[in-house]
Image: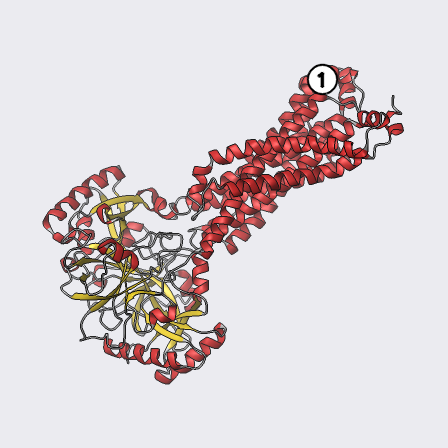
Amino acid sequence: MLNEIRFALRMLIARPAFAAAAIATLALGIGVNVAIFSIVDGVLLRPLPLPDPERLVVIWETHPSLRVPFMVASPPHLEQWRGERRLFDEVGGFAATKLTIGDSGVAEQIDGASVSQGLLPALGVAPALGRTFAPPDFPTGAPRAVILSDGLWRRRFDGDRTIVGRAVRLSGVDYTVVGVMPPRYTFLPSITIEGKPPLARSEFWVPQPLGDPEQQRGAHFLVAIARLHPGVTIAQAEQRLHALALQNSRAFAVDRDWDVRVVTVRDQATAAVAPTLLTLAGAVTFVLLLACGNVANLLLARAVGRRREMAIRVALGASRLRLARQLLIESLALGAIGGAAGLLVAAWAIRFARAFGPASVARLDEARIDVRVLLFALAASLLASLLFGIVPLVQAMASSGGWLKTRGGASIGGDARLRSTLVACEVALAFVLLAAGALLVESFLRLRSADPGFRPQQAIAFRVALPPERYAARADRYRFARDARQRLAAAAGLAGAGVIDSVPIGEDRQGTGFTIEGPSLLADGVDAHTGISFPGPGYFEAIGQPLVRGRTFTDGDRAGSPPVAIVSQTLARQAFGEANPIGRRMRVGFSSDIVREIVGVVADDHHTGIAHPAVPNVYLPFEQAAYTGGQSFVVRSASDVATTVAIVRRELAAIEPAAAIYNVRPLERIVAESMSTERFATLLLTAFGAAALLLAFIGVYGVTDQIVSQRTQELGIRVALGARPGELVRLTMTGALQLAAVGTVIGCAAALALARVMSSLLYSTSARDPFVFVGVAVALLAAAGLASAAPAVRAARVNPVTALRAE
């Protein structure tokens, strides 16, 4: 066995061109498969780094009749679920929140979670330093406590182990640090579902004081996380919670027709990205098959030159089993070297994915080469060795009886047919990958050109942190926003300014219920669900969100003035159809007593993402709402970001020198980041398609070149009988194009069969787009023609005297 391994390695060294081509092809095929597996493993397969993660579930509220498939929980429902001790060990909730840390002018915004009692025990993670929250930390008015993440502790406090018990200032308020979380713990994976404030990672945790839950019935703002009691299934939990929801629906009007849905945390976190990753995993499998087909073709071509060697082995008494073992060892040696090179390719690809992959893919940073990935690489190498080695092995065994009867360079029709079949299969696989890549490119281009509902060009958003000691009163914050908007709108170099609680797409948006007074298309007396925003005067003009009907907000829409509202086109259509909603009256908020007049209708701003359908939204004047959060400004400027920020700092400093500007982002970048997952999938699948096209090109070239070599004598006879060079070129290229045509037809049928898989990844694009399929077919046939051109020219230059000399 060792002798045969050494012989296999010597055979590779003796033919460096063959070895280099085969190893490079295998490295590409195996490497991309290992890279994608490591990503799939880290994102989809690995359990969450929490105790018994399979028992962690998310409890969503749902209202099918209002088309609300997922909604965060209200406090009284959360407390009700906490009482179900037979179902759950612990139940808790959290809401995403933001605080600022640092001195005025250099403030940093940090993302965190406001957590209720029971949440951290449900997750089963204790701080590495200090303690977790205790019941005395939660009542309203209790001293403020905070738990820091390990990253924030090291970045802002230099890893000071005496931090526990000290006060830190966050958003101008003193918090007592009670604990520091373990390294690499960033809370839950991102759960980005409409209606829930997304939280990709958390750098701090603060208690969520709920007060009297009954006073907040109908206020949905908590993501409910529960740990199932051992032995309890999701179906059992849903059945019991459904019964509780039915009781609430009968007892409280605000809870009418609300239901629940229980989903595992892992399934919820991966639901959005799983189809994309699994599609990519299928695509790289095609790349591996293409690579194996090319290597099999190389081995078949090399086998023609080894016929006399094998014939001598048979004559000296070698059995078929011995020859088969030798050929198999050679394939395994080639696969092992290709697999080792593939690990290098995979390491680079994983590093690229972690650096440039979309932030929306939770746990992408956990993709790495470890024991599991190494075992997969070994399995992929063995599988590849069998795939590309079995074809020449079977062909060799079938031809062993005629080895001594053939001349070393004789043409064997079976070889040519087998290699042609492999090439046709390669073209078919390449067609599927190229079609998928082309469809994603078309989809992404349409997504980029889609109207987000506002004009992001030359618009910049930023947030402002104010000293809380001077802006504790809501009226003071309103005054600052009003003065800042007026100064920014009048500043040289700026073409408009407006304030809002959260800019579309880039920041979280709250949700609430609403009812319409008088006739509408909605059920009477039942709250419909809507997003809610709080813009000030000038906002719609600054962001470029078109006014469809009525008017926008003015400086007269303040506290004490008649309550008004502006609705989005989707809300107006759902509530009023084609009727004019201007002048109609509505209540915004679950069980709200404030009646507002609708004064305007604006275009949908696609807050949940451009690729998602528009959802209803209502806008209330900034100074008429009980909103107490931060302030986001939008300014429009033709200058670069640095110049615009300098103008903004100068104007705001004239009003409040201690105002801190942070989270500065052009709206174009916000829109681009919202498409990062689609861009990443398009880039990878297009790259796989390009690799497939290259491998198919090499395959067509290799088989055409080998056929020309085997038909040299025939070509010489044709020339001697008067065949013209053009006829030989046409004869050679026709064979190659016929192979490509057969492969194209097979690939087209396969791509049509897989259209349903692709449909879920496409935006405003048909998975059976005829223009894409025709374009891919033309590209493959052109590549086949180009690949066969050089062998065809060589065939046309055959010297009949040289070709027939052996006769």
Relative to 692, residue 601 above or below: below
Residue 88 in the image: x percent, y percent?
Answer: 23, 45
Left/right placement of residue 714 relative to residue 382 reads right
Quadrant in which the C terminus appears: top right
Quadrant in which the N terminus appears: top right
| Res 462 visible | yes
| Residue located beneath label 1 in the image | 400
Q: Please tell me which residue is depicted at 36% across the width and 45% down the height of the picture.
A: 266
Return the residue found at the far bottom. Answer: 654
Residue 146 in the image: x percent, y percent?
Answer: 31, 64
Return the residue found at the far left. Answer: 251
Disc tally is 1
Q: In the structure shown, which secondary structural element does the residue marked by tag 1 occupy? A: helix
| Res 170 visible | no
Crowding around mark 1 (Cα neighbors within 10 Å: few <14, some 14 to 19, many 20+) is some
Left/right placement of residue 472 relative to residue 304 reads left
At label 1, which amino acid type do we have?
Answer: Ser
